[in-house]
Amino acid sequence: MVQTWEIPDIGPVDVAVSDRARHVRVTIARDGAVKLILPRRVSLKQGRKFLESSRDWILRHLGRVQAEPVGPALDWSQARRQLVARLDELAGRHGLTYNRVFVKNQKTLWGSCSSANNINLNVNLVRLPDDLRDYVLLHELVHTQHKNHSKAFWKALGDLVGDARGFQRQLRQYQPRP
């Protein structure tokens, strides 16, 4: 179910109820489109309250998005080569291994790691600042050893990047798909 709410100062907000969503989330696309994603168990009333409580954050990020120029179209083959080369470099430096790597244009994920240690990377990682791109690559490489987000996972990742939670917070300022 998708509906659109008109919110003063923000404009139209697409509201989607998702069976897959675990948390209430607001996203802002590069074109300034605002979307509220609700897990099925969350009421529309609760969603509206969350949206209202997020007003300052939305307005701040809408200003950023509208100020950023949209970058040129990506060269897929160059982006793939760049991402795989950096993944290999980081894996070798830290003694981590993976099976295969796939580069995709994912809507919501920056990356993922399968139980078979195949790593999926979002082609738009090449648009991120270098430190955040490396954080995502290391995040997925650590998943080859820790298959969940346990304390052991965060400790291992923190040993490699320092403030892993800080990087995670910074990453939320960006959308995986322009």
Image: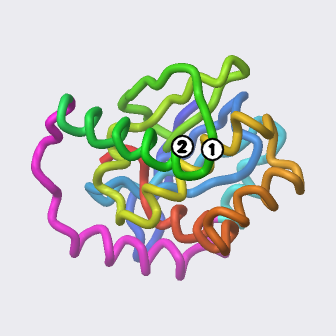
Say if 52 sits above or below 60 in the image.
Answer: above
Verify whether residue 152 appears in magenta: no
Q: Which residue is mark 1?
A: 95
Q: Amino acid at mark 2?
A: Ala
Left or right: residue 159 versus residue 123 is right
| Labelled pair 1, 2 in contact (Cβ < 8 Å) | yes
Residue 172, picture quadrant = bottom right
Q: Position of residue 67 (x, y in %)?
A: 22, 75
Q: Residue furthest left?
A: 72
Q: Residue at x 49, y 44 (%)?
A: 110
Q: CA distance from mark 1 to mark 2?
A: 6 Å
Quarter of the image that includes the N terminus: top right
Residue 66, picture quadrant = bottom left
Q: Secondary structure at mark 2?
A: helix
Left or right: residue 171 versus residue 105 is right
Left or right: residue 101 versus residue 159 is left
Q: Nearer the viewer, residue 177 or 164?
A: 164
Q: Secondary structure at mark 1?
A: loop
Q: Amino acid at mark 1?
A: Gly
Q: Residue at x 37, y 48 (%)?
A: 125
Task: Name the colouring of the figure.
Answer: rainbow
- The dot on residue 71 is none
Q: Residue furthest right?
A: 151
Q: Which contiguous range is marked in magenta? A: 51-76
Q: Position of residue 177 (x, y in %)?
A: 36, 44
Q: Residue at x 52, y 44 (%)?
A: 92
Q: Nearer the viewer, residue 151 or 37?
A: 151
Q: Position of residue 170 (x, y in %)?
A: 53, 70
Q: Which residue is mark 2?
A: 91
Q: Residue at x 64, y 74 (%)?
A: 166
Q: Main secondary structure of the magenta part?
A: helix
Q: Position of residue 54 (x, y in %)?
A: 61, 73
